[in-house]
Amino acid sequence: MRAATLCSAAGSLLLAALTAAPADGAPEDPGTGTGTGTGTAERRGAEAAAARAAAAGIRFGDCPDADELPGSMRCGTVTVPLDYARPDGKRIELTVGRVRATGKDPKRGGRAVLRQGALVYNPGGPGASGLHFPLIGMVPEWKRLAAAYDLVGYAPRGVAPSAPLSCQDPERSVQGPRPSPTRPSAAYKKERAAEAAAYARGCAERAGDALRHYHSLNNARDLEVIRAALGEEKLTFMGASYGTYFGALYAELFPGRVRRMVFDSAVNPDPAGIWYRNNLAQSAAFERRWLDFRTWIAAHDDVYGLGNTPSEVRDSYERASRSLAARPAGGTVGPAQLQKSFLRAGYYDDHWPHRARALSAYLKGDPGPLVELAGPLVETAAETENSSAVYTAVECNDAPWPTDFAVWDRDNTRLARRAPFETWENVWTNLPCAFWPASRQRPLDVRTAPGELPPVLILAAERDAATPYAGALELRRRLSGSVLVTERDAGSHGIAGGPNACVNGHLEAYLLDGRLPARDASCAPRPAPVPTAES
């Protein structure tokens, strides 16, 4: 499923990813892979590319959209091989953004602080850009980190403007109203399978042979080249959501190059789950978050009038969905658009008030707020299409997937009986991987031995659905010496630099002073959202 990505407090775009195998057991017919892609040729290619990048550095200047950015934000490019097995072959450019460390601690009267080099960030996806991450230094919760670190973000390979991928005309990505059945008919499944196959063909036709080089192992190698280009002897990295997965791959491939790493909302790195089973686990987890959201709405029935029990709220939602199927709101919002908008509320608690208000207003005869929230954005069609193309390419290239739709049908029909909210929409998002024309990787088995990797910090919300909590536990188990900080009884996706002062205290202690708790720690949840009757 396409998860939203984030920059926590600033709220940016995500995906993320997913987790443990469902209780139903292993999928049949997983397809075939072509190996891990971690052989001698790729290793030497990464070394050669990093050496070239270290010699060239980065020439920072105006950013692609410089007119809309503060003058402190500067951009440049880093050249990486398209194929690390052939480092002298075709190369592509990754666009990097940076804001220099301010050098003055706002909590200490603006006194000078030790500058600690670059903090490189990835917000997740696959398909999200961290290019504008450095601007987060203007957010109060990030000012101490911005004092000590050059904040660096970048657009990963495939994400515009870094050798952007495309799978279809962007205008086609702006979908009109469509159904979102929780019990799709055989005819509807056949229709969506045909669409998925056509989409996969479009990716191959537009990208050609280059398509197979957009995957997580190459994202990890690109990160090593960026480190070298920045002139950093060792990498300080923070990844959120999907960014934790290829960050973990980096830790496995280049443990001696790690200074400090923060993994926020961790993907389960178990190779058995990448990515088919992880998506099944994610769909199951979103059912619980959907219940959390409905429980909150029911507690504020005096504000929204959608029911005073979670079941009554679900009835109100389904009544709206049926009405939208008959007559789309504003001619643009049907059941699928409604579901997508409410699914996003599963990522971020602060989305709850506006979604509840929009649903309430719609059922009272005012479709305006719902159209505003869920309607298509034509002006962002190219960005949306590009993000979807990268998401699809990376997830499909990363691992074997079932190639027989009967496997998808069996597993998801079974899952949808207990988790109907997200299951089938998740299938349609990922189904192009059943028809993928490019060769697949075999997922790397991430494990580090004691002393091989510096201690790393893992952050997780206990009820996160986009990257279920089991993933954080598994990552901690696999990275020897890592420490997990949990936001208890909370479900927002991405917790670093957000409203939880306890979480931020651990983050700052680690990144500023290298201090971790002696053992796993926990923080009380952030306050629940405040209901609002108006936008």
Image (spheres, rainbow, N blue to C red):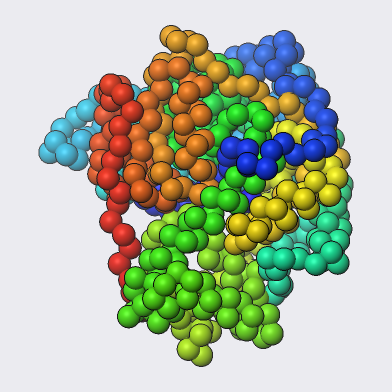
Can residue 256 be seen in this snapshot?
Answer: no
Can residue 105 be seen in this snapshot?
Answer: yes
Given residues 62 and 492, the one toward you in this image is 492
Point 52% across, 15% down: residue: 448
Given residues 454 and 59, the one toward you in this image is 454
Point 47% across, 34% down: residue: 472
Q: Residue 44 vs residue 314: left or right? A: right
Question: Is 151 located above or below residue 361 in the figure?
Answer: above
Counting from the top left corner in percent of width and height, residue 149 is at 34, 31
Q: Could you tell me which quadrant the C terminus lies in?
A: bottom left
Question: Is 140 located above or below residue 221 in the figure?
Answer: below
Counting from the top left corner in percent of width and height, residue 469 is at 47, 40
Point 66% across, 62% down: residue: 381
Q: Residue furthest left?
A: 109
Counting from the top left corner in percent of width and height, residue 245 is at 56, 32
Counting from the top left corner in percent of width and height, residue 365 is at 51, 90
- Residue 179, by quadrant, is bottom right
Q: Residue furthest bottom?
A: 365
Question: Is 344 located above or below residue 47 in the figure?
Answer: below
Point 65% across, 59% down: residue: 417
**Number of dots carrying numbers:** 0
